[in-house]
Image (cartoon, rainbow, N blue to C red):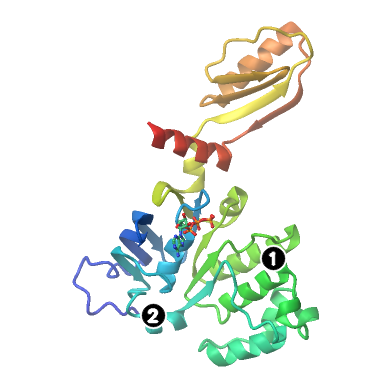
């Protein structure tokens, strides 16, 4: 793998060869609206990095800048040692991109689309390999315009991973896919990772980031609100447990966490899951209270977003 960094001064973005992507103070404004408000991102070579965040947080806008399709209004960006704004033609052969909306020619069949791709993309690969990999063999003669949403998504992914590029950027790769197609997409992403490729993806699914990503950044309103490994981020949030009480139980034990009660349903959010759950179960056992629907779980993505919004309002 070569680095095209010779024209950059030491310490400038793009000179750290352990990083596939280095973003400093990225800002994107659309007229008077700031979609990305000065973010920093480091993506290491060979890792899967997930961008999560609320709707409109700026994830797609950020990816578009990394891909060289979007225009930044501030900051510096290095992708594989290149500036995507000015060096896109050098970057393009080394990067595979899956957009949120694929741009297909509806009249071409699936096979013709891949054959056209074979002519356009410098990286060698075979349509048959990808038809099989993404279970599109049975659709090879179908015009792209007649594919289902999930099939189009798989074709788009096949084109992004064509020839196993150094860097693959995927915008919501599994949105709208059924569980089996999602699993196959995850397998394809893991395959890239095992081959030492770098993958950046956006997702709205915590379990997807959990299953795939080495590190994540969570965006909200144009900023990176939290970053790190997902287990660090989840561990920093209170966990929760919930149960339904039998009718007529009026009082509850004292617990360190926040207790919400709605009728007989009790939900507790706590930083001391073991302590509070032990106290709660001990209280139920001592009183002979029969609990139903007892569940304990770490923070969900909704909990994390709620915590980010609450922090923002302070
Ligand atoms: P989602 O999860 O909903 O896909 P996102 O995090 O990918 O959201 P973006 O698509 O990056 O969000 O959009 C960020 C903000 O910028 C949104 O408020 C969006 O409406 C706005 N935006 C995006 N593109 C444009 C544009 N071309 N002109 C004006 N505003 C835009």
Which residue is painted at 56% across and 75% down in the image?
160
Q: Earlier in the sequence, mark 2 or mark 1?
A: 2
What is the x, y in percent for residue 81? 33, 74
Report if residue 48 is visible in the image. no
Q: From the viewer's perspective, tell me whether residue 284 is left or right of residue 123.
A: right
Quadrant of the snapshot with the N terminus: bottom left
Which residue is painted at 63% across and 69% down in the image?
188
Quadrant of the snapshot with the C terminus: top left
Compute the Cα span from label 2 to label 1: 30 Å
Viewer-closest of 271 and 39: 39
Viewer-closest of 2 and 260: 260
Circles 2 and 1, Cβ within 8 Å, touching? The answer is: no
On the image, which quarter does residue 155 sit in?
Answer: bottom right
Q: From the viewer's perspective, tell me whether residue 208 is left or right of residue 66.
A: right
Local secondary structure at mark 2: helix
Local secondary structure at mark 1: helix
What is the x, y in percent for residue 106? 68, 82
Give the residue number, with chain letter if any, for mark 2.
88
Q: Nearer the viewer, mark 2 or mark 1?
A: 2
Give the residue number, with chain letter if any, for mark 1.
184
What is the x, y in percent for residue 175? 64, 59
Which residue is painted at 44% across and 81% down in the image?
92
The 10 Å Cα crowd at callout 1, few under 14, some 14 to 19, many 20 or more, is: some
The 10 Å Cα crowd at callout 2, few under 14, some 14 to 19, many 20 or more, is: some
Q: Give me the disc on residue 17.
A: none
Indicate if the residue with disc 1 has its beta carbon within 8 Å of ligand 1: no
What is the x, y in percent for residue 227? 42, 48
């Amino acid at each position: 793998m070569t680095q095209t960094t010779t024209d950059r001064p030491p310490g400038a973005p793009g000179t750290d060869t352990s990083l596939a992507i280095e973003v400093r103070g990225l800002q994107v404004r659309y007229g008077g609206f700031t979609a990305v408000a000065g973010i920093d991102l480091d993506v290491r070579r060979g890792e899967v990095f997930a961008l999560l965040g609320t709707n409109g947080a700026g994830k797609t806008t950020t990816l578009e800048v990394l891909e060289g399709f979007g225009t930044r209004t501030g900051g510096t960006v290095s992708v594989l040692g290149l500036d995507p704004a000015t060096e896109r033609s050098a970057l393009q052969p080394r990067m595979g991109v899956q957009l949120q909306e694929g741009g297909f020619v509806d009249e071409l069949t699936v096979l013709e689309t891949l054959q056209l791709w074979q002519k356009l993309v410098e990286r060698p690969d075979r349509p048959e390999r990808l038809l099989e990999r993404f279970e599109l063999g049975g659709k090879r003669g179908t015009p792209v315009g007649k594919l289902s949403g999930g099939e189009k998504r798989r074709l788009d992914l096949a084109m992004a991973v064509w020839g196993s590029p150094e860097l693959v950027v995927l915008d919501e790769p599994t949105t709208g896919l059924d569980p089996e197609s999602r699993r196959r997409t995850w397998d394809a992403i893991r395959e890239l990772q095992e081959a030492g490729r770098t993958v950046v993806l956006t997702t709205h699914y915590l379990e997807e980031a959990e299953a795939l990503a080495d590190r994540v950044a969570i965006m909200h309103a144009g900023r990176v609100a939290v970053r790190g490994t997902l287990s660090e981020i989840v561990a920093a949030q209170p966990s929760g447990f919930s149960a339904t009480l039998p009718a007529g139980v009026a009082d509850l034990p004292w617990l360190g966490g926040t207790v919400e009660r709605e009728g007989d349903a009790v939900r507790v959010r706590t930083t001391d899951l073991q302590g509070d759950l032990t106290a709660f179960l001990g209280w139920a056992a001592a009183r002979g209270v029969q609990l139903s629907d007892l569940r304990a779980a770490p923070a969900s993505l909704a909990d994390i977003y709620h915590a980010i919004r609450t922090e923002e309002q302070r």
